Amino acid sequence: ILRVSPVLSDESSSVSLLSACTSDELQALSQEMAPLLTEHSNNISMNAALFQRVKAVKEWADSEDGKALSEEDRRMIDGTYEGFERSGATLAEEKKPRFCEISMQLSMLGLQFSENNLKATNAYQMHLTDEADLAGLPDTVREQAAAAAAEKGLEGWLFTLHSPSYGPFSTYSENRELRKKIFYVTTIAAAKATVEGIRAVKSRGADSVKSLQQFHSEIK
């Protein structure tokens, strides 16, 4: 894909990093790029000529001539073939358009879930003003939390549910109650994103999920 479409690959890298660094502009970009990336992926997996070449390599690997392949090469060949298979390459021609339509809808639902999860993550911050609450935390973690608080115009230390903040706090903090608090909040944030995702599926995506399940049963 990188060789076929380097420009699109650069854009997809920006979309894939949303959970690490996001903004309103990147969120808008993700909404714009998700269907393009899905269409691009479908065009690759549904390319009959390309799949025939993949299939030929798979058949060769499964023959006597392919016995000398290393385990790594065999896994790569098998994985590539199975990826095409799961992406609808072996479907009858009349079913491929519907499969592409469903995958497009599911990609948007997946994006919506990611955005819900990110919103729930961004909504929480734990503001500490008592240095005793920092017991066990390395200096680098304290400095990072102090900088986060200062950025918000706050005194003390600020911790969030983002991994660079949440992870070290959960690992090194000696305050069991605070560790439990931030763990529960993380669990609630994930649950909230899941609930919002379920609502989205019920409101506009249930048909996509059911249709994809039906397609999978037909492929098997």
Image (cartoon, rainbow, N blue to C red):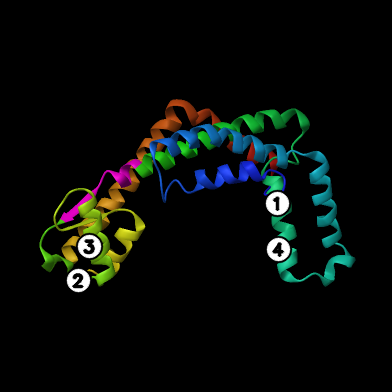
Is 90 placed left or right of 178 in the picture? Answer: right
Lower position in the chain sequence, tag 3 or tag 2: 2
Residue 16 in view of the camera: yes
The span from disc 1 to disc 2 (Cα, nearest Å) is: 47 Å
The C terminus sits in image quarter: top right
Residue for badge 1: 82
Mark 3–mark 2 contact, CB under 8 Å? no
The span from disc 3 to disc 2 (Cα, nearest Å) is: 8 Å
Lower position in the chain sequence, tag 1 or tag 4: 4
Q: Mark 4 is on which residue type? A: Arg
Q: Secondary structure at mark 2?
A: loop
The span from disc 1 to disc 3 (Cα, nearest Å) is: 42 Å
Q: Is residue 40 magenta?
A: no
Is 165 placed left or right of 153 in the picture? Answer: right
**Residue at point 37% right, 44% down?**
118
- Which residues are the magenta region? 119-127
In the rendered structure, find residue 179 and report the number of the disc placed on it: 3
Q: Residues within 10 Å of mark 4 (few under 14, many from 20)?
A: few
Mark 2–mark 4 contact, CB under 8 Å? no
Q: Mark 1 is on which residue type? A: Glu
Q: Camera-side residue: 145 or 188?
A: 145
Is 97 placed left or right of 151 in the picture? Answer: right
Residue for badge 2: 174
The span from disc 1 to disc 4 (Cα, nearest Å) is: 10 Å
The span from disc 3 to disc 4 (Cα, nearest Å) is: 41 Å
Q: Secondary structure at mark 1?
A: helix
Residue for badge 4: 75
The percent coordinates of residue 46 (x first, y second) are 74, 38
Q: Mark 2 is on which residue type? A: Glu
